[in-house]
Amino acid sequence: MKQIAVIGAGSWGTVLANVLADNGHDVTLWARKEEIANEINTFHRNHAYLVEAEFHPNLTASSSLEAVVKNKEVVLFVVPSHAMRDMLIKIKPYVRTDALLIHATKGFEQESWKRMSEVIAEELPEWHDKIVVLSGPSHAEEVIRRSPTTVVVASSCQDSAELTQTIFINSYFRVYTNPDVVGVEIGGALKNIIALATGLADGLGYGDNARAALMTRGLAEIARVGSAMGAEPITFVGLAGVGDLIGTCTSKHSRNWRAGYAISQGKSLSEVLSEMKMVVEGVKTTRAGHALKEKYNIEMPITEQLYAVLFQDKDPKLAVEDLMNRGKTRELQEMAQGW
Ligand SMILES: NC(=O)c1ccc[n+]([C@@H]2O[C@H](COP(=O)([O-])OP(=O)(O)OC[C@H]3O[C@@H](n4cnc5c(N)ncnc54)[C@H](O)[C@@H]3O)[C@@H](O)[C@H]2O)c1
Ligand SMILES: O=P(O)(O)OC[C@H](O)CO
């Protein structure tokens, strides 16, 4: 049994905390709002994020970072990417020197375009080679129902990855390890761009062929930029790549897919974001993807078109036309750039 702190009481943080509580660990969840902590402690519920779920009684919550993090053997970060550095700065004084650090955030830091483990390593350098990332096809709404789910935990430290696997794994939550931190983080983050694009295409009524095209050609983009950034290409056919693309691009649970769908129905990006109370990482990640494409001088046509739709008011139908009318391509030669 481990003493575990979970930072972030949104949908994913609460559900991961509940998996750990199901596994017999003593889990304390940090909630930004005191009323959410009180609701979890009193009613074992967090109805703002998970309407009907009732949590394991071993799961308690607090809005005091010090109380949550101090003396904990494991600290799990599940805040949106834009909040990661600020949270790290705040918890730094309380983290035990031998704590296992895990994050389950899918995104990049804005402007620096750093991966989340790079941000953690900058703020907590003693952990630079031990950080673990948890990713894969895993919608909170299904994990809370204990529906069979598979995820991957990546770390350059095999012991840390295996310890993370051991504390999370159970009969509904199967955990694989992978040493490729870069690939797992990039796959989990960039699939959100493709999920937004499939939501748009679905909303425009383009159907299964277009969705399959976006997912397959999206995977090629992810693999190309991922390889350039040092990922193992084979990671992208695993849970954090193909797995999460399928899970997100074909699911109405996906906030990214729903945001794309809403934009296809004529809503502006700011309307969509203000109506959706949960984080839509794919919007900021489209900026990151666009910047990485420029930095590594890589062709990412879907990312480029989505960027134009989201941030330059391009008509989504015209974006699809432009994608379809690109020059002829040889599939194998072009795919080989990423694998
Ligand atoms: N929801 C899922 O099914 C799921 C699955 C896998 C991964 N993820 C990833 O997990 C991360 C968190 O997503 P989520 O679904 O829990 O989001 P959410 O929108 O449900 O909750 C976000 C939480 O972060 C808190 N928060 C927001 N801004 C903050 C700030 N500036 N400082 C501190 N806290 C802040 C909110 O109060 C809330 O508790 C994202 O990167 C997401 O991609 C989500
Ligand atoms: O709801 P989304 O689109 O943020 O996706 C959540 C998870 O990343 C799915 O694995």
Image: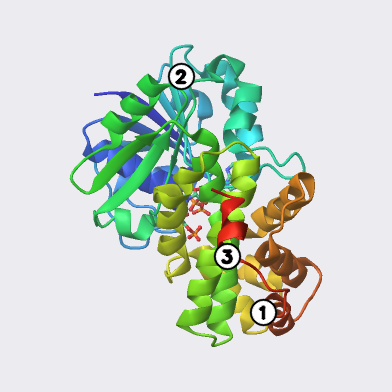
Q: Which label's residue is closer to the chain start, 2 or 3?
A: 2
Name the amino acid type tagged 3: Glu
Q: Secondary structure beneath disc 1?
A: helix
Q: Which class describes the residues within 10 Å of circle 1: few (<14), some (14-19), or many (20+)? A: few
Mark 3 lies within 8 Å of ligand 2 (Cβ measured): no
User: Foreground: 34 or 176?
Assistant: 176
Picture mark count: 3
User: Residue 332 location, x and y as percent?
Assistant: 55, 60
Q: Residue at x 24, y 57 (%)?
A: 147
Q: Which label's residue is closer to the chain start, 3 or 1?
A: 1
Q: Which label's residue is closer to the chain start, 2 or 1?
A: 2
User: Residue 144 location, x and y as percent?
Assistant: 30, 54
Image height of 101 relative to 152, above or below:
above
Of badges 3 and 1, the one in the foreground is 3
Name the amino acid type tagged 2: Lys
User: Quadrant location of residue 23?
Assistant: top left
Callout 3–callout 1 Cβ contact below 8 Å: no
User: Foreground: 39 or 193?
Assistant: 193
- Distance, label 3 to label 1, CA atoms, is 15 Å
Q: Secondary structure beneath disc 2?
A: loop
Q: Residue furthest right?
A: 312
Whether residue 34 sits left or right of residue 85 in the image: it is left
Q: Which class describes the residues within 10 Å of circle 3: few (<14), some (14-19), or many (20+)? A: few
Q: Which residue is mark 3?
A: 331
Q: Which class describes the residues within 10 Å of circle 2: few (<14), some (14-19), or many (20+)? A: some
User: Residue 233 location, x and y as percent?
Assistant: 51, 44
Q: Which residue is mark 2?
A: 70
Q: Residue furthest bottom?
A: 205
